[in-house]
Image (cartoon, grey):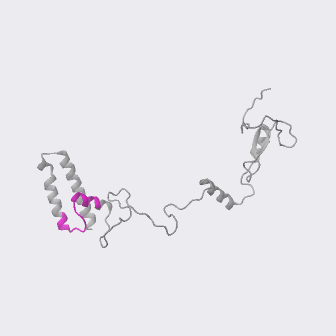
Amino acid sequence: MKRRLDHVAVAPDPFASSDRRCCEWAGCAADGDYRAPQSRDRLDQYRWFCLEHVRQYNAGWDYYRGMSQADIEADLRRDTVWQRPTWPLGGGRRGAARWRVHDGFGFFDADEEIDDKPGKPPVEPAHARAFAIFGLEPPVTQERLRARYLTLVKLHHPDANGGDKAAEERLKSINEAYATLKNGYFA
């Protein structure tokens, strides 16, 4: 005889033996085809019910029954990391060395750059790019910066290069670098 089911909450166990299981609900003689966990502490051990009683059992199931609010919160926190231990981001172990990366192009935009030479002030990534365009290394005086700027403008001006678009782009980057250094480095 084939049974027609309206809603199937839990599929029958495909690995169940061919032996007939009876529903574990008190007073029920139907087949126990549907499994449900015994308790929160024994989720891998099951009770077997018929469809009607597994629905009732599931409706009354409360995983957190008997737990305090603090216990529930702690369990939820452990579940967010699949019950695995975790460490704070960026902190590592206490006392562990923190690795730093020297990034001359500003990809990581560190708060401060690592400098091998003592006594030399730290340079921001935007200023480092500007110094690279000028071919200079800090410290630089305003007079030296202006002299280098005038030399580069004369060398890369589009009129001096026959209207070359590449020269025009180089001049734009030189002007931006000069504005960055003039307004930020000497301010």
Q: Camera-side residue: 101 or 154?
A: 101
Q: Residue at x 18, y 49 (%)?
A: 167
Residue 50 lies left or right of residue 157; in this view the side is: right
Above or below: residue 98 compared with residue 176: below
Instruction: Determine whether 58 is above or below 18 in the image.
Output: below
Decide: is 15 above or below 43: above
Name the side, left or right, on which 81 lies relative to 95: right
Residue 183 appears at what percent x and percent y? 26, 63
Quarter holding the C terminus? bottom left
- Quick one: 6 or 123, which is closer to the camera? 123
Q: Which residue is painted at 78% across and 43% down in the image?
A: 56
**Magenta highlight range:** 128-145
Outermost residue, right direction?
Answer: 27
Is residue 13 shown left or right of residue 24? Answer: left
Magenta-drawn stretch, dominant element (helix, strand or loop):
helix
Q: Residue at x 53, y 62 (%)?
A: 88
In which quarter of the view is residue 164 placed? top left
**Is residue 143 part of the magenta span, yes or no?**
yes
Q: Quadrant of residue 152?
A: bottom left
| Quarter location, residue 72 | bottom right
Left or right position of 119 against 12: left
Looking at the image, residue 63 lies above or below residue 112 = above
The residue closer to the viewer here, 157 or 82, is 82
**For residue 17: magenta?**
no
